[in-house]
Image (cartoon, rainbow, N blue to C red):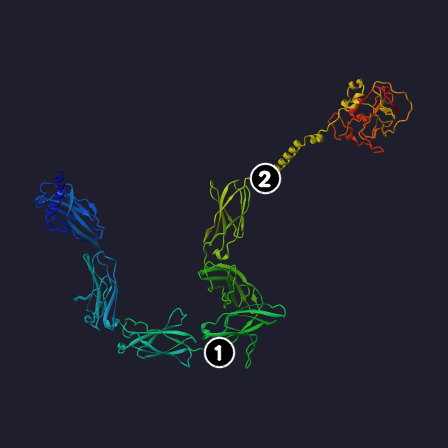
Amino acid sequence: MARHGARTPFLLRLSLLLFLCPGGEWAPSRTLGCASVAVGSPVVPLGSAVTASCTIRSELCRGLEQGKVQITWMLDNEPMAGSQHRGPGGTEVSNLTLPRFNRTQAKLWCWVEWNGTKQRVGMAEIRAGYPPAKPFNLSCVLNLSDYGLTCQWEQGDNSHLPTSVALKWSPRAHPSRCRRSRGQAVTGCTPQGSHSRCTVPRRLLQLYRQMEIWVSAANALGTAESEHLCIDPMDVAKLDPPVLQSIQSIPFQTDCVALAWEVVQSNAHMELQCELRYRAPKDPTWALVTGIVGQAGTTQCCGFLFGTQYHFQMRCRRSSARGYWSEWSLDRNYTTHEKAPTGKLDTWWSTRPAGAGGRLEVQLHWKAPQRREANGRVLGYRVTLSPKRRGRDPPTVCNTTHTQCNFSAPAGTRRVYLSAYNAAGESGATEIILLERKGQPLARLWAVPRGEHSLWVRWEAPPAPPAAYVLEWQRVSSEPGHCSACWQMEHDGAATAALIRDGIEPFQQYNISVYPLYEDAIGVPVHTAAYSKQKAPSYAPKLHLKSISKSDAELCWDPVPVEMQNGFITSYTIFWANSTTDVSSATVNPSLSSFVIRELKPSTLYKVHIMASTAAGGTNGTSLTLVTMVLDDIEIQFLFLSLGLVFVLLILLLICFQKNGRVKQQFWPSVPDPANSSLGKWVPAELQQEPLQVPGVREPGLATISTVTVLERAAGKQPSAWGKEPATETTGTFPALPQPYVRQEGPGTPGRGWAAAEPCQGPGGSGETVQYARVVGDGYKGQQHTLPRLYLRSSSTQPLLLDPSPSPKPYQNLWFHGAAPLGRPADGGCPEEPLATFPLLQGLRISGAEELHDCRMF
């Protein structure tokens, strides 16, 4: 059952197709069994409205009698909405209106939907377009070879509809004017395919009789005709060209030639009118000779140049017709005979001394003679220092085929002579006066482009009117070359402009100079530069980093070569940017080749590029990446210097720690303690307990030395111990004492007296013996008597003061005061510092001299 139910839709579909379309569904606008489609017009103007209807007869369609029929529309593949209603006789009718039909061709389908299935039941094809356009430019030509009349025309705009075109003709009704004929039109020919030309055969033509000819175009929307052409077919006949037989020069008239030709046999019975044209290979246009009678067969023409090759052509047509000329005949070449060159040559020169010998180096340039003056092919040029005289040829300094010559002439030469020669002879000599360049220059000079290969050079004339001008130009290049054609002469002295063309190329710079020519001198040149056309430079210069700091960067570049500039460099633009800020730029004068970027951020990456600009555009260069420094050079130097100083200090501290004892000895010398010396063993106890008096706290006042007690050891005696009675000897021999040093203030000067005795060597001959002395001072001039003070001298070998370094205050080392204010004693071996200022000896002070042994009063 399931399989049987699955087959039911297919069977229904098949039966519906068979019953609905028994007669085929593709015939438009007719009954298709039980369905029919009708349109208002199958061809409509493009953009107009279209109406259509589809009618379904249910009683004729088995299977649709009981069901509801739904009709839909499709325009090609696009659904369209129509209106459906029930028609007479139980039919279902759907109407469709398209307000604007904008397709040139489309198919309109009618569909029936029954039980969920759509089927096409009818179709109508609709075309849209325009009426045919009017043909124009109708022309006809009669070919005398077969006497067929070939006409051609131009068709108008496409009508988008099938259009039939035909060439029609009829006998001319009115002989005086051409108008639409009321007679029966005869179709002359129909073009093949899409061509706009066809040929009327000879059998349909009436020669030597006026005919009215036109083109007719027709389609479903209308008919159009071209303008009527009324002609006699023989009037539009195109003859065959004549044949040139010979061309010869006339000996007596050297600039004239005689030509002979022959017409074809089919044109021999007609009266012909012919034209002749000729030109030289370098001529841009043809020279035309008219009014030649074709039946004559010969003619003469004059005004030809000597020694010049010409191309000749000829054509003909009927004299009484306004028809067509024949084609031009085949070329025939002819070269006229030569004669000696004529005229003067344009020259330009420069001179300079040749060094030793007093000779003159001359560089002479000239222009080749014009074709009218050359009178043939120039074989060479001759330069002499004197004119040619009858029967005598002057010596030749230069004989060349070029247009320049360098030669040496005697000093003082003012004139040279130039002539050209060909196979027929030599021209008259052109006199060249070698004038000095010291005349007045132009007031102003400038140049503007006229085209890509030419320049207008304009100037303001100098105060004195010149006879002519010489313009000189040369392309600016890194390797300038010589160009013999880079100058020209302007013979009009009143001219203020000249056009230069030779060697001018776009995007190249040219230096232009203009020299005024006077009767007795040549003017000083004025220079200018110009381009015939400019564009952006071929490339921009490459940036180089010259120096950089934390806020500045100096860039440099090489200028763009002049060949690659393609115009005048107006400026260089420097662009720079980091990753976080906008792009900054600066414009640089084109004469500069370096630039300093300022106000940069320290330790920042920047990208920099340069743009070279002309009046026609700019070109960017490659990017340069740079990073600014953290510190400037001065800061880096200061940092390194500081680090160096710190390093030196560290080295010194390390040395100090390594050499601790020696450094300590240098800065803090070891001062011996007298209390712990051998002297302390024989100093009385009461002396040890006596307070130390420092020189800074001594009583002020004046003192006078009254007694100097010197302790010394007698020869051969040993010093007794402290506390024992010394031997009573009032006299005796003492060993040699050191020279005492005694200083005493003057009698009238307040102060304190002091004295010192300082031996240089001990009694035992040892240099380490130190002797001390006590200075006893009395009151001065009635002052209160004070106890006498003694200084003892000891021959102790204890090294008390061996280190010359000063001791920290309040103690003072005697050896640091070795330089006395008043000088040294005569022996120079003892210090001059007063002993009263030596604090260590304060501990050696004793109460009296009676307990001392071996002393003597002075």
Q: Which mark is residue 505?
A: none
Look at label 1 and name its amino acid: Gly
Choose between 484 and 630: the one closer to the eye: 630
- Of residues 649 and 213, the one nearer the viewer is 649
Residue on which the image places disc 2: 635
The part of the image, by quadrant, that contains residue 274 is: bottom left
Vertical comparison of 542 with 209: above or below: above
507 over 67 or under it: above or below: below
Image quarter (top left, top right, bottom left or bottom right) of the N terminus: top left
The residue at the point 49 percent across, 58 percent down is 563
Image point 54% across, 51% down: which residue? 593
In this orientation, which residue lies closer to the viewer: 728 or 310? 728
Count every numbered label the image shows and give the total: 2
Name the secondary structure under disc 2: helix
Q: Position of residue 605 (x, y in %)?
A: 50, 42
Picture quarter containing residue 705? Answer: top right
Relative depth, front residue between 828 and 610:
828
Judging by the rendered image, the residue that carries numbered circle 1 is 425
Mark 2 or mark 1, which is nearer the start of the sequence? 1
Give the left or right position of residue 694, taking residue 588 as reference. right
Is 798 on the left-hand or right-hand side of 857?
left
State the image coordinates of residue 278 (x, y, percent, origin top left): 37, 73
Q: Which residue is farthest right?
A: 731
Answer with left or right where residue 370 lies relative to residue 660: left
Dot in front, 1 or 2: 2
